[in-house]
Image (tube, rainbow, N blue to C red):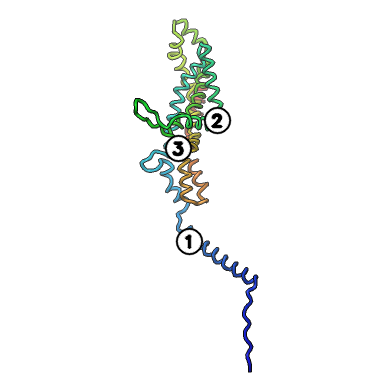
Amino acid sequence: MTTGSVPAPRLTPRWFATAALLCCAALAAGEAGAQLQAAGSRPGVLATLWKWTPLVLFGPPREFGGFALNIAVSFLAMAIGTLAGLVLGLGLVSTLAPVRRLSWLVTQFFRNSPWLVLLFFVMLLTPFQLRIAGVAIPLPGWLKATVGLSLPIMANVAEIVRGAVNSIPTGQWESAESLAFSRLQTLWRIILPQCVKRMIPPWMNWYAILTMATPLISIVGVNDAMTLTQDALAAEQRSELLIPMYTLLLFFFFVYCYPIARWTIQLERRYAVRN
């Protein structure tokens, strides 16, 4: 009795396609399992936000930055803009036509210029350091960004000063003139003290606007809260953290700026009654 030989399997193209699909499925299952295992070892969203909160608020260790730097820049820019805007605003009400026209031109230029363009303008045109008497004084990026933000504040404060001075009744100017006060004495002793309560509400409003505009300095390389939030997202490499991290940053600005806005409304109501 003879036995026939078993025929060898034929390696058809369909066989190769099936084997390739099975290999791909095995690799995909292994990669998915590894991702699930890694995701299971990752901390939750709230724990991750808590981990990065100190960095976003205060910056890296031994380096000033983060949201605290945004507040510091807003304080310094508002101080510079207020002092310069006071001088520019008095120039707008000057009796000298050349001074008045030049002040108007500077005010309109910086009031109608984009803040981001002014930031790049200052960052690119100012040097990285100043050399005075052979001593090199560095100019950090946050300082140059502060000067850039103070320019539009200066122009808007000048308009606030001009409007407050013009709101004082002309009879007070005439009374001061009859008492032999000079124009400078009238401004500093009579007019400007009355202008303070008129200027405080819009001044506070512009400070809140300036604070909310400080994240623009991240575009010019300053290590502020926006930059550190982006660094945290890049370090985590988790897409589900995108909205929570930026929501946390929005929360910081809201908590700081909302009381200022409410206080401004209260001052406007109080001074509107007294005026």
The answer for how far apart the CA atoms under marks 1 and 3 are is: 37 Å
On residue 57, the disc is none
**Which SS class for mark 3?**
loop
Instruction: Name the kind of residue labelled 3 in the image.
Output: Val
Q: Nearer the viewer, residue 26 or 17?
A: 17
Q: Earlier in the sequence, mark 2 or mark 3?
A: 2
Q: Closer to the camera, 45 or 174?
A: 45
- Residue 116: x, y in percent? 52, 33
The residue carrying pointer 1 sits among few (fewer than 14), some (14 to 19) or many (20 or more) residues within 10 Å by Cα, namely few
The x and y percentages for residue 40 are 47, 59
Q: Earlier in the sequence, mark 1 or mark 3?
A: 1
Q: Position of residue 57 (x, y in %)?
A: 42, 41
Q: Residues within 10 Å of mark 2 (few under 14, many from 20)?
A: few
- List the residue tagged with mark 3: 222
Q: Earlier in the sequence, mark 1 or mark 2?
A: 1
Q: Quadrant of the N terminus?
A: bottom right
- How far apart in space, not on screen, are marks 1 and 2 (Cα)? 49 Å
Which residue is at 62% across, 86% downward? 5
Q: Is residue 189 left or right of residue 92?
A: left
Q: Is residue 165 above or below residue 217?
A: above
Q: Is residue 216 above or below residue 32?
A: above
Task: Give the spatial CA distance, label 2 vs label 3.
Answer: 19 Å
Residue annotated with mark 1: 37
Q: On the image, numbered disc 2 is attached to which residue?
A: 114
Q: Position of residue 13 (x, y in %)?
A: 65, 70
Q: Are marks 1 and 2 in contact (CB under 8 Å)?
A: no
Q: Residue furthest front?
A: 134
